[in-house]
Image (cartoon, helix red, strand yellow):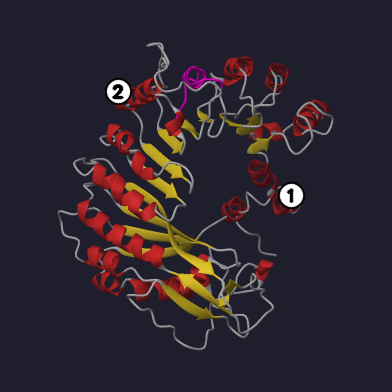
Amino acid sequence: MVETPLEVVEIILSILYRDTTTLSRCSLVSRDWLPFCRRWLFEEVDLTIHGFRSVGGRHSRLFKFMEVTSNTSPCTFTNFVQRLRIDSSFTPYHIAGLDTIDLPKLHSICITNSQAAGIPSYLLSAISTVFAERVDDLDIAHVKFLTNKAMIKFICSFENLERLALGSNFFVDFPLDGAPQANIHPDLRLAPNLRSLHISSGLMFLDDGTHGWLLEQFKSGCKNLRKFEIECNDQALGIAEFPEFLAAISDRVEGVTLRTRSRKGPEEIQALFSRSQDLEFPNLRLLCLNCRVSEVKAPSISGLNALPISLGREGMDITLNIEDAKKVDATLGRLIGSLKAPCLKKIVLTLFHHSSYGTCTAHTLEYISFPLFDKALAEKGPGSLPMLRTVEFIADGCTGRLEGGRCFMLKDIGMDVPIDANSETVTVAKASRPGTERFETLASSFLDSSFPTSRARNGVLLSLFREVV
């Protein structure tokens, strides 16, 4: 029997790290597999509240976790725990209980919101007292605080932070217009070794004083900041509202990620860089953008939308709105010619669509083109992104099979569907039987049809990869 090399096993199991059921089964295959499975099974421990079960109840995850660790001797899985997820329903007593568990590799804390009244100050104090010295990764996005000042004081207590995620933070006592602004003590500063900052929408809820303090920290206090990520949803403040934050770190940032699920995402990305058009990003090496490229709709019947289309039905059509893709194409085309980033080596574009009908993005890409982006890449001169060598696209794909019943299967159509440059929609006929085309074939077809000029010149390597969910 030929054994699989352990380095290959590690790669395979790392891909399954979100599938705890499969990992648990894999841990029984061999003693050699056990350490790899445990690494992914116990890397993150979620102790947050679920449903009606209170955090202190007999059936809560916290109670079970503490019971297992205290009754297991020796308890070896705790050596793999790196991240804890807790919520605002905890008490100082629960935090003290966690402190009694030996978690030698713990370095990350994520706090989620579970109370309308906001997270109390005594709980913040307990968390910082127990975890501040060893935690270098803190996620407080969406947590509701009593005041802006309470949030600032809390994050500043973690002096060893290297990664911070905040935003969408609401406050019980928010200063009204004309009210005194928060008085931030001058000794309160963000961790000097902060290297990665993730901001989700919602920073508009900071008063001017706190907003100014945060901006000043980015300008003068976070000299080691290298990675900057902005994430916005449909309802909240758009990406275009953050140019001052981008400007504050433009001289040192090496990686920028912009995520938006809004239909206005392409315009927001363009506006963000347009407002920062006089800026140069001398150290930027990686730019990641999440782009919505289409919307999948059911056909109209007598003026009414059809019901969601079942995989078992044949001969149905859907409408694919590609207006978003045209906006993305225009934005990327302009960005290639205007962005001042002499060290930029790679652009990663995660493509997704809005759909309620079980389609995967990969099967919609053959109806989408990027002529302006293709032209900009092909004509890119030595003065425009001279180091850019790679453009990667990422999309979810089902390979056209019935696995999991995920995809409407837009392959094996039986006829070509022309793409009208002036049209915002195309109609796609469902195949009479499931297709079996490989994702790699879809990727090659998409790149050949959308980027013929760039592919012919071989100046930039273009690839399409399947998103790992």
Residue at the (67%, 47%) spot, across then down: 37
Label 2 neighbourhood size at 10 Å, few (<14), some (14-19), many (20+)? few
Identify which amino acid the numbered label 1 is placed on: Ser
Residue lying furthest front: 303
Numbered disc in front, either 1 or 2: 2
Q: Is residue 341 visible?
A: yes
Residue at the (59%, 21%) spot, across then down: 131
Magenta segment range?
146-162
In the image, taking residue 458 as reference, residue 28 lies left or right, namely right
In the rendered structure, find residue 121 and report the number of the disc placed on it: none
Secondary structure found at label 2: helix
Residue 215: % across, % down: 34, 27
Residue at the (24%, 68%) spot, across then down: 375
Q: Quadrant of the N terminus?
A: bottom right
Q: Is residue 163 above or below residue 297?
A: above
**Residue placed under numbered mark 2 in the picture:** 220
Q: Is residue 159 above or below residue 27?
A: above
**Residue placed under numbered mark 1 in the picture:** 24
Q: Is residue 330 above or below residue 241?
A: below
Residue lying furthest bottom: 414
Q: Quadrant of the C terminus?
A: bottom right
Identify which amino acid the numbered label 2 is placed on: Ser
Residue situated in front as seen by the camera: 66 or 183: 183
Residue 186: % across, % down: 37, 11
Label 1 neighbourhood size at 10 Å, few (<14), some (14-19), many (20+)? some
In the image, taking residue 45 as reference, residue 299 lies left or right, namely left
Residue situated in front as seen by the camera: 452 or 169: 169
Quadrant of residue 417 in the image?
Answer: bottom left
Q: Is residue 440 visible?
A: no
In the image, taking residue 308 as reference, residue 239 lies left or right, namely left
Q: Is residue 39 above or below residue 21?
A: above
